[in-house]
Image (cartoon, grey):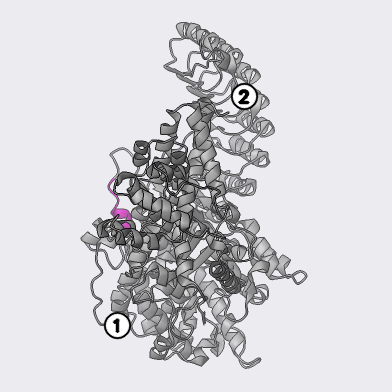
């Protein structure tokens, strides 16, 4: 039995079931409810409105059925079960009288079976009905609209028969009885089975080896794949007191219900910086599906590369996209395509590298026909919106800069790929180097050189470190510090690999680079042209036009694209987009075209397209002007901004004094080199000053607060690449910034190194806010050089563990300016409590410590209490969302009895009971400083609240007491009211009256 109360209790699960598949599944449920007369015809019409979100229709159905009583609720649950069974049964057992005197009623009573019988024959039945005059040509065309599946066309024909009184219902009842019974489900048809097999074989072959990062040898994905940190993206905004860290997902959970933004959307977006492992993540997904180990809810998976699709000039339809640009069915093309249209919920499409499209997402042009061709842009945008192949899952990868607010409206889920964790870096290197001792030595080297270790959170950098392990382990001059250093090292590695043994000495400065200079210039010219035209795969014709020959290709920087656009030889692409940017920067440095105007363009804080109109409107709304003919400056004017920024950072690194000798080796004149270096320094310093001066002036009497704009982190990285202390000092000279905010800016360890390199030269202390980034323990270590200029450091939600905090505290003790530290939403445990207690005991001017939403228990709280006893300056202590319990609360309360400075204490959500409350009450009797005490989400109950009430009676300082969600009944409330009568300083008491369940009906 299903009571109405039980039905309501299961409402969210029922909504999930009704929207989990496609519209086809929902309409199948309606078929059963109509046939059982649970729904009237008027009910059905109200639930079949076109264009309504599926979740809204599902909730309306639940409301309609609930109003029909317990019987209706039972029937809905049975209908959902029947609809799920219907997907597996070849034929529904049902028979009817073809000469029934009430044909319309019989069509409704046997509707599920008739829809199944009509499935493969609806076109022929429509033709017959039109020939006999039962339907008009207009009605026939309306039913045949390409947006409807075969089952939906059958239902619309039955709906028409219900309202027409011209004999159509009797005709259908007779004719459908004569149709052959389907012998198998559509996907068990020979054509579909053969196509599924071919698709699996093709994808398995394409995804078995990692070729993107390696032109010289193939790495087996199964042996080398290492999980990245994959987080559900959270919106910026005010957090709830007990908001935890962003949830992380494993790859196998990609299509789970966690973190959904919009149940009616079909598109899942994975964002990540260049080199964070987005392509490899999709490749792993494809391999798991093709090998039958996961994602088997999808019968068909279609992988696409956006950089390849961008090369397609002719119009495409959905059919052309799937069959001609992914996998062609050897037989029954129409049957296979019809199945894909009829069962989109069994289809998965993946689009890798949306940021590499020349266009941006737009909803201006609607296209709903799966058979009519249109442009690649319109086709993809309508697929992502669900106007085409609605209910088919789409997975999209992109760099963050290419994701607009308009695209986010179409997302079911957004995930952020953070790259490798520290454990991931170590695991990856051990998988790459199974020889005894090699991985251990390499890991020790990384841990000893934090700058290089910080770069390795990007999988592409970890691969480079793995490839260059011999050069790194035997390098005499120290390890690379910057990205430019590392890319020059990999350049040396590839050039040595391509040279005959013993033909050249080691090192780029010993003739190796000069000997290959013509090849490098040709590759660089190809890279510049590709960036300027947003082209990342190169045909044989394009290679020939750039004079790139077999000798240049043999160096290994160009590899065959994984999937091939039909109609020619396999195109080539650079190992990675960052390699294309590096070669472009190398070409610009070595060529004669690097003019001052090009430097200004590259290092402009606004970018090349910084007109007023372009800044006011989204990129998609501003048509790109025709590119004028000219040199590299004109060519790069149309490059994507994020690629231009990567190129500019490499350019700054190549123009550093450290690499001046290398450029001189390549016959760059000393005068030209000095001019370019001076130009780059001037442009970077000017851009940074422009950025800060564009921020409105501070309110009189307050410090200037700056929320860095998107280009700020890039400018800092470019300054860091030059590795010039004098330039960094000059760039921040005279800046008056009281609070620098860099939240949600993708700041990782490498960015922390750059920030510390520049910010340590500030002359005035500032607050540095890095909440919601990927700093980690390595990033904390990189920030230490600028800690002396920080008066406050905010590191909320940064995946920091005890190790990082211990290093931070070790330096913070000696930083006189540092007064505030926020470390909530991290991975801290009792292991860091001794360091934090030492910080409290040693720093006499320390004001605020916030450790909320970590994993500190009673043991850690007891250690912190020892530090509090020796501290006389702390004003704010936040421990919400931990597990200190009664024992921890007792220890803290005892330490705070005579504390003279603490004004705010938060112990929200710490599993504190009556014993802890009693200790806090005794503290309130003696403490003369505390003004706000937050104890929500605990287990104080009436006993604990009564104790606190007694403490309030003797307290003359507390102004705010927060007690919500503590199971307080009338007894506790009365005790608080009595205490308030005797206390004239308290201004606010917050609590929620709890009524036990057994008394709820009274």
Of residue 141 and residue 171, the one placed in the foreground of this image is: 171
At mark 1, the secondary structure is loop
x and y percentages locating residue 180 in the rendered image: 50, 60
Whether residue 874 appears in this view of the structure is no
Q: Position of residue 70 (x, y in %)?
A: 50, 27
Horizontal side of 471 relative to 725 (left or right) equals: right
First of labels 2, 1 by sequence position: 1
Q: What residue lies at 25% left-to-right and 76% top-to-bottom?
A: 627
What residue is disc 2 on?
A: 912
Q: Which mark is residue 631?
A: 1
Closest to the observer: 300 or 499? 300
Q: Nearer the viewer, residue 535 or 418?
A: 535
Using the image as rendered, state which of residue 328 and residue 245 is in the foreground: 328
> Residue 159 got which mark?
none
- Quadrant of the drawing holding the N terminus: top right
* Circle count: 2
**Measured from the top left, where is residue 827 in percent x and y?**
61, 44
| CB atoms of marks 2 and 1 within 8 Å | no
The CA span between labels 2 and 1 is: 70 Å
Query: Residue 997: where, in percent of width, then height?
Result: 56, 17
Give the secondary structure at mark 2: loop
Mark 2 crowd level (few <14, some 14–19, many ≥20, 10 Å Cα): many
The answer to if 694 sits in the magenta stretch is yes
Q: Quadrant of residue 477?
A: bottom right
Vertical relation: 28 (above or below) 546? above
When the figure is inspected, residue 218 is found, relative to residue 791, above or below; the finding is below
Mark yes or no: residue 320 visible: yes
Magenta highlight range: 691-697
| Residue 308 magenta | no
- Position of residue 455 relative to residue 783, above or below, is below
Compared across the picture, whether 343 is left or right of 250 comes to left
């Amino acid at each position: 039995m299903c009571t109405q109360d039980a039905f309501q209790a299961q409402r969210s699960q029922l909504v999930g079931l009704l929207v989990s598949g496609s519209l086809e599944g929902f309409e199948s449920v309606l078929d059963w409810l109509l046939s059982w007369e649970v729904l009237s015809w008027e009910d059905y019409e109200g639930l079949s409105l076109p264009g309504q979100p599926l979740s809204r229709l599902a909730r309306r159905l639940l409301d309609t059925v609930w109003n029909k009583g317990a019987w209706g609720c039972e029937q809905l649950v049975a209908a959902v079960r029947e609809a799920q069974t219907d997907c597996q049964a070849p034929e529904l057992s049902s028979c009817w009288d073809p000469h029934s005197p009430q044909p319309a009623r019989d069509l409704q009573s046997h509707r599920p079976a008739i829809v199944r019988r009509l499935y493969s024959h609806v076109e022929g039945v429509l033709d017959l009905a039109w020939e006999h005059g039962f339907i008009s040509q207009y009605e026939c065309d309306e039913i045949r609209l390409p947006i409807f599946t075969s089952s939906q066309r059958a239902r619309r024909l039955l709906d028409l028969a219900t309202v027409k009184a011209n004999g159509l219902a009797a005709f259908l009842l007779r004719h459908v009885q004569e149709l052959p019974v389907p012998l198998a489900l559509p996907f068990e048809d020979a054509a579909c089975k053969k196509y599924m097999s071919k698709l699996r074989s093709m994808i398995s072959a394409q995804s078995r080896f990692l070729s993107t990062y390696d032109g010289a040898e193939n790495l087996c994905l199964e042996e080398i794949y290492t999980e990245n940190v994959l987080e559900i993206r959270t919106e910026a905004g005010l957090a709830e007191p007990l908001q935890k860290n962003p949830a992380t997902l494993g790859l196998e959970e990609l299509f789970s219900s966690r973190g959904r933004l919009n149940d009616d959307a079909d598109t899942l977006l994975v964002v990540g910086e260049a080199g964070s492992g987005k392509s490899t993540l999709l490749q792993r997904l494809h391999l798991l599906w093709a090998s039958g180990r996961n994602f088997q809810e999808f019968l068909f998976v279609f992988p696409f590369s956006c950089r390849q699709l961008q090369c397609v000039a002719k119009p495409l339809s959905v059919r052309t996209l799937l069959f001609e640009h992914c996998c062609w069915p050897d037989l029954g093309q129409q049957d296979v395509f019809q199945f894909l249209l009829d069962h989109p919920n069994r289809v998965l499409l993946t689009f890798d590298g949306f940021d590499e499209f020349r266009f941006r997402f737009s909803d201006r042009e609607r296209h709903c026909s799966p058979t009519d061709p249109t442009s690649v842009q319109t086709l993809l945008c309508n697929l992502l919106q669900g106007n085409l192949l609605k209910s088919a899952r789409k997975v999209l990868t992109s760099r963050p800069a290419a994701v607009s607010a308009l695209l986010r409206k179409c997302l079911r889920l957004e995930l952020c790929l953070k790259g490798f964790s520290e454990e991931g870096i170590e695991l990856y290197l051990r998988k790459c180097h199974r020889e005894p001792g090699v991985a251990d030595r390499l890991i020790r080297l990384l841990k000893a050189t934090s700058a290089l270790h910080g770069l390795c959170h990007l999988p592409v950098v970890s691969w480079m470190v793995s490839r260059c392990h011999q050069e790194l382990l035997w390098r005499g001059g120290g390890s690379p510090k910057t990205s430019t250093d590392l890319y020059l090292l990999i350049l040396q590695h590839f050039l040595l690999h391509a040279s005959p043994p013993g033909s050249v000495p080691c090192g780029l400065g010993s003739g190796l680079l000069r000997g290959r200079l013509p090849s490098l210039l040709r590759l660089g010219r190809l890279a510049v042209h590709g960036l300027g035209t947003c082209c990342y795969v190169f045909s044989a014709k394009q290679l020939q036009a750039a004079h790139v020959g077999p000798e240049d290709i043999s160096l290994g920087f160009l590899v065959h694209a994984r999937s091939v656009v039909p109609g020619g030889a396999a195109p080539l692409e650079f190992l990675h987009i960052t390699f294309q940017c590096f070669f472009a920067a190398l070409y610009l440095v070595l060529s004669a075209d690097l003019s001052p105007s090009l430097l200004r363009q590259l290092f402009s804080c606004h970018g090349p397209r910084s007109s007023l109109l372009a800044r006011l409107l989204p990129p998609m709304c501003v048509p790109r002007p025709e590119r004028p003919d000219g040199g590299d400056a004109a060519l790069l004017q149309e490059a994507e901004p994020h690629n231009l920024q990567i190129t500019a950072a490499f350019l700054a690194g190549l123009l550093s004094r450290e690499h001046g000798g290398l450029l001189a080796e390549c016959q760059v004149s000393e005068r030209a080199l000095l001019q370019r270096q001076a130009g780059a320094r001037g442009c970077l310093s000017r851009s940074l000053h422009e950025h800060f001066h564009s921020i409105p002036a501070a309110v009189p009497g307050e410090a200037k607060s700056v929320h860095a704009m998107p280009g700020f982190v890039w400018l800092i990285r470019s300054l860091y690449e030059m590795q010039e202390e004098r330039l960094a000092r000059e760039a921040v000279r005279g800046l008056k910034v009281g609070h620098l905010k860099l939240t949600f800016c993708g700041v990782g360890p490498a960015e922390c190194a750059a920030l510390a390199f520049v910010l340590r030269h500030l002359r005035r202390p500032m607050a540095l806010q890095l909440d919601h980034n990927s700093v980690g323990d390595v990033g904390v270590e990189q920030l230490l050089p600028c800690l002396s200029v920080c008066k406050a450091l905010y590191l909320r939600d940064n995946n920091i563990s005890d190790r990082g905090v211990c290093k931070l505290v070790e330096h913070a003790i000696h930083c006189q300016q540092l007064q505030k530290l926020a470390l909530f939403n991290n991975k801290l445990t009792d292991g860091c409590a001794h360091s934090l207690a030492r910080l409290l005991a040693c720093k006499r001017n320390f004001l605020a410590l916030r450790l909320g939403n970590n994993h500190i228990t009673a043991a850690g709280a007891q250690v912190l209490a020892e530090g509090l006893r020796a501290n006389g300056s702390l004003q704010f202590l936040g421990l919400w969302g931990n597990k200190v319990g009664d024992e921890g609360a007792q220890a803290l309360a005892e330490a705070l009895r005579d504390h003279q400075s603490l004004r705010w204490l938060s112990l929200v959500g710490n599993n504190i009971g009556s014993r802890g409350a009693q200790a806090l009450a005794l503290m309130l009797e003696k403490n003369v400083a505390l003004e706000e005490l937050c104890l929500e989400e605990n287990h104080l109950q009436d006993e604990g609240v009564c104790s606190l009430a007694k403490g309030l009676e003797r307290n003359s300082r507390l102004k705010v007491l927060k007690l919500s969600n503590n199971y307080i009944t009338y007894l506790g409330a009365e005790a608080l009211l009595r205490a308030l009568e005797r206390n004239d300083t308290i201004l606010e008491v917050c609590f929620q009256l709890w009524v036990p369940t057994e008394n709820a009906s009274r």
